[in-house]
Image: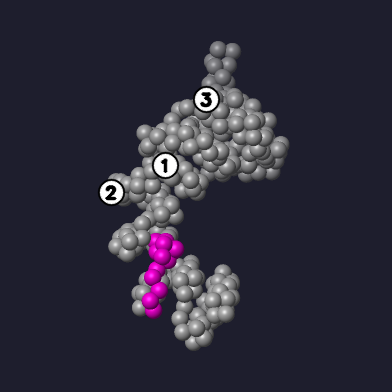
Amino acid sequence: GEKLDLAAYNCVLDALICAGAPGPAGQLASEMRSRFGRLDIVSYNTLLKGMTAAGEIDKANRLLVEMEEDGVTPNDISYNSIINANVTSGRFKEAWQTIEQMERKGIAADHYTVSIMLKALKRRGSGHQVKRVLAMVDKLGSSVCDEEVLLNTLVEVCIHLRESRRLQDLLSLFYRSGKKPSQHLYGALIKAHSQLKQMQQCRENWNEMVLERAMIPNDIVLGCMLDALVCNGEVEEAVALFNEWKGKVGANMVMYSTLIKGFAAVGKADEAMSMWEEIRAAGSSMNAVACPSMLCLLLELVCFAYMSCDSWIVFG
């Protein structure tokens, strides 16, 4: 029947868009109009996806108008595609205008809309924008815990903005929900508690993950835990944890940089030099974070050696 045929055409249209072939996709859309007399919401959203992915936002806006002229009402997917494209290209004013247009049509901002705007705050968030986006979050209430991508993004934004009270409320809301975090969310929770100076909760999340649930952390989550320990003055515990897990997870320069930064903070030059030798033995090179920390420690060593030598010359 016609519905099946149109669905089949939509599958091919999506394949062309995903393959980055807008020309053939446009030709197919024209053929669909000729054969069926119209496109449906799936067809239009697929075309919008291609236009926004290519950064053709003005063209996508014109397609929205065309949809309505054809009697097809844009839905949340239609608007979110354009909102996301605007945010990605730094057009925050236009993103808000699209949200206002969507709401005038009676379509409320959903989890995906809020996630998009939260990402915008990480890139450029004025005081007014922060209040506006967080007001959108508040409208969702406890349902923010139902969508992990949104929850994770919200935690990251609260950390970035140093919204400590909101961050604490969000953590409490999540724990009351009784939901079990994914590995990625464990990393965000550990970072959140670290910023709030709650090392016991960092350890509890880590132990729940690796002991109670027998999950093997990836390098990102291990890096989060190492950073939490170092930032809260537990450098020795961080080194012990690193040595325990590096064989299973693998070591990277982010981890080495974190530990060297910790050694620099407490003036442990010998330990930093030992780690530098480990990095060299592994064939790795310093990154932009580790290098300044290492240089500071090397300067300390040079000064110490110079003072010792000078004392020997004067008093020896």
**Amino acid type of the residue tagged 1 in the rendering:** Ser
Q: Look at the image and say whether residue 2 sits in the magenta stretch.
A: no
In the picture shown, does residue 123 fall above or below 315? below
**Mark 3 highlights which residue?**
200
Q: Nearer the viewer, residue 149 or 11?
A: 11
Residue 99, position as x, y percentages in the image = 34, 60
Residue 5, position as x, y percentages in the image = 57, 79
Q: Nearer the viewer, residue 288 or 224?
A: 224
Q: Look at the image and say whether residue 73 sits in the magenta stretch.
A: yes
**Mark 2 highlights which residue?**
128
For label 2, the SS is: helix
**Amino acid type of the residue tagged 3 in the rendering:** Gln
**Mark 1 highlights which residue?**
142
Residue 269, position as x, y percentages in the image = 58, 27
Point out the tag, 2 or 3, that comes first from the N-terminus: 2
Mark 2 or mark 1, whichever is nearer to me: 1
Residue 281, position as x, y percentages in the image = 71, 38
For label 1, the SS is: helix
The local crowd at label 3, few if under 14, some if 14 to 19, many if 20 or more residues have their Cα within 10 Å, is: few
Point out the tag, 1 or 3, that comes first from the N-terminus: 1
Q: Is residue 284 visible?
A: yes
Q: Quadrant of the C terminus?
A: top right
Residues in magenta?
70-83
